Image (tube, rainbow, N blue to C red):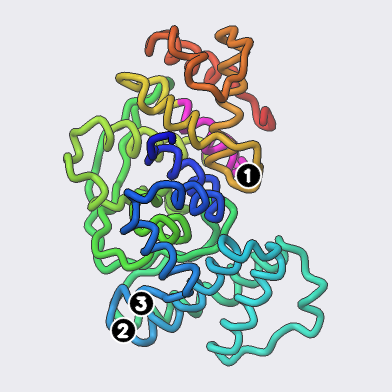
Amino acid sequence: MEKYSQAEFRRYLLQGKLKKAFVYLKQFPNQKKLILQYQERFEQNKFPVPCDNEKILRILNIFYSYYHRVFWEQLEEEKAKKKLIEQFFSLLSLSLPENLDEYSSDQLDEIVKSQIDPLLQAQVESEGYHYLGGITQGFLGPYIWKSSQPDTFLVQLPTQTMSVTVNMLRGFISRSWLDYISFGEIGADGWAGEDNQLYCVIESYAEGTQSDIFQINYLKHEAQHLLDYQLFPGISSAELEYRAKLIELIYQKGKQRFYRFLREADNNPKNSHSYASFCIMQNLAKRLNINQDPSNPDNWEHLTTEQISSAALQLYQEYQPGII
């Protein structure tokens, strides 16, 4: 019997394939504790209680129901979003559109963005927390945290050095869907805001702000987003991630990041992170003459970190909008 691989398990979660992750997990009796956690949360549909604020818990429970429908029941995207909208319109005492069943997925997202999220933000902030709604890697889900402290950093990128403001966020009780289906093991560690500032889940960086994981995985990655918002207005989420992940590979010290992207790569345009990794691997394979299956890590072992970084820089320099 094969040995349990945490990387393989997480690969399924990163791709949003919760049922496949659980099927894989159940093969390994030595993972009994984790199996029981997943059975309780998803087979028994028992929601967590991350805080003692009843108003925020009512909001979170609607999102938890949405996660269950999308990732466990594998309900169609539009049906899951419509149910979420119905629940929030009831909670917020809003009147549903008469023709909601005819709305597209994008139209449903706009209802959440323009009508639901502003009201949820106001409710959460009235309770002393911060709120950010919207879409993460193709799926709805909120970020809710307690406190924020700004700091300033200089960031070197291939074309320039930037001074950026980073808001250090603490006291999270929600980090959207990936955090939920991974029991807090995986999730967004920060983001680039529309206000030209960065936001960092500082509790994810126990090694400090001088560590490579902060300086490269977070700071360079997110600063590249800020730059690309200026250079390419309207750039897609997948292309934002494509460029920022190339930055990580350009500055990587070792091949850990490369193999992480290789594991999460998935030809699914709705999941911007996984799809960006897929496109990077396909383009690197062409650049570095990987003629056999590029999803197989064994086919990349002969390459050095420097070779991969150099090829990533070439892809970064050759980028044109619409390339993926």
Q: Secondary structure at mark 1?
A: loop
Task: Residue at 50% x, 69% y: name it.
Answer: 43
Q: Which residues are magenta?
A: 230-246
Q: Where is mark 2, residue-wise?
A: 53
- Describe residue 67's horizontal placement relative to residue 49 as left or right: right
Graded by Cα atoms within 10 Å as few (under 14), some (14 to 19) or many (20 or more), the crowding at tag 3 reads some
Task: Residue at 76% x, 77% y: name it.
Answer: 100
Q: CA distance from mark 1 to mark 3?
A: 29 Å
- Describe residue 120's horizontal placement relative to residue 305 as left or right: right
Amino acid tagged 2: Asn
Q: Where is mark 1, residue-wise?
A: 234
Q: Which quadrant of the structure image shows residue 302? A: top left
Q: Secondary structure at mark 3?
A: helix
295 above or below 22?
Answer: above
Task: Residue at 53% x, 62% y: name it.
Answer: 134
- Which label number is shown at residue 125? 3
